[in-house]
Image: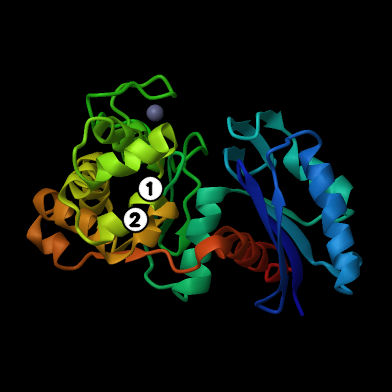
Amino acid sequence: MSKAFTIDLGATSAKCAFFEDEKVIKTFVYKTIDKTNLLENIAKKTYEIAKENNIDMNDLDFVGVAVCGIVDNETGTVIYSTNLGWKNYPTRKELISLFGNENIIVLNDAKAATYGEWAASLNREPDSMALFTIGTGVGGGAIFNRKLVFGDNTGLPSEPGHGGGFQNQFQCDCGLIGCLDPVSSATGIERRLREVGSTSTGPLGKIYADLKENIHIIDVADLFINGDPEITKIFEENLEPLAKCISVLIHFFDLSMVVIGGGPSNLGEPFLNIIKEKLKSYVLPDFYSKIRINKSNLGDLVGAWGVYKYGLDHIINKK
Ligand SMILES: [Zn+2]
């Protein structure tokens, strides 16, 4: 028997799940707009939900959290999370006291998603892969030789959104010039939708006239899927820096799979096809013919699954 509770802690919501023997037995979502005493409030809610569902919190083998921020995996400290307003936040310590459980997993959310996709959805195949998650920024994670990559020097990978000089239009919030984050993220794509929409005389212009600055990718999803040329061009241009970054990784590490997750990946094949088409120009045929570019399969629960599987492998099965 393995029982666990996991939290995928994001800027606007925490997706929480109870697991028992490789099955999700109960999920709930906690809104995280108000960040005061966040973990304490989530813990309170968790105890309530557990009671309503006859789940004994004392039976849990471990509690885990995936956090949108940079995590020191050794100490379980969140070094930095802009979205949560945390700096050097002793997350593991806090969770030990809130849940009365010494077995705590703290992972970066994109690393958790990578592990979830690999261990839960792909059945631990292939041996090496990378995952990119496109949202507010561009996050990522990698499995190399069947292990989640934590780096060898700083312990701070994987940050595919930053560095590399893949574009020359924007300075990134991180301070560097040329990061792909401000262009290929959902935020970057939406910024461009507003820019183009404000002067467009096509369908995008009509949507812009209604929604103005509130235009989001979801609002143009149908047009995109039906191949609207103006919107397609925006996606093509904005995904270019991401494709360049992926191509470098493919050549360097000879990965066999790249998984794309995050909100825009729900646009499905037409979205993946843009990335695949771009890669054709940037990847040598020998690599291109073998690489698999997939969409993330676990949807909203990918982070929760990642933390659960990581806990199973690193706490339960190590005992
Ligand atoms: Zn950056």
Query: Which amino acid, by three-letter code, is at mark 2?
Result: Ala
Q: Is residue 313 left or right of residue 64?
A: left
Q: Provide residue 260's location: percent of width, then percent of height.
A: 36, 57
Mark 1 Cα-neighbour bin, 10 Å: few <14, some 14–19, many ≥20: some
Against 179, is 236 above or below?
below
Residue position marked by numbered label 2 in the rendering: 221
Residue 262 in view, yes or no: no
Q: Provide residue 10's location: percent of width, then percent of height.
A: 61, 45
For image coordinates 33% across by 34% down, the residue present is 194
For image coordinates 28% across by 53% down, the residue present is 253
Question: Along the line of sight, which residue is nearer the eye, 254 or 194?
Answer: 194
Q: Secondary structure at mark 2?
A: helix
For image coordinates 82% across by 67% down, the residue present is 60
Against 127, is 12 above or below?
above
Mark 2 Cα-neighbour bin, 10 Å: few <14, some 14–19, many ≥20: some
The picture quadrant for ligand 1 comes to: top left
Q: Provide residue 127's location: percent of width, then percent of height.
A: 38, 67
Residue position marked by numbered label 1 in the rendering: 217
Mark 1 and mark 2 in contact (Cβ < 8 Å)?
yes
Question: Along the line of sight, which residue is nearer the eye, 225 or 38?
Answer: 225
Residue 50 in view, yes or no: yes
Query: Which amino acid, by three-letter code, is at mark 1?
Result: Ile
Q: Provide residue 202's location: percent of width, then percent of height.
A: 19, 43
Q: Is residue 14 left or right of residue 132?
A: right
Instruction: Calculate the distance from the C-alpha at mark 2 to the C-alpha at mark 1.
Output: 6 Å
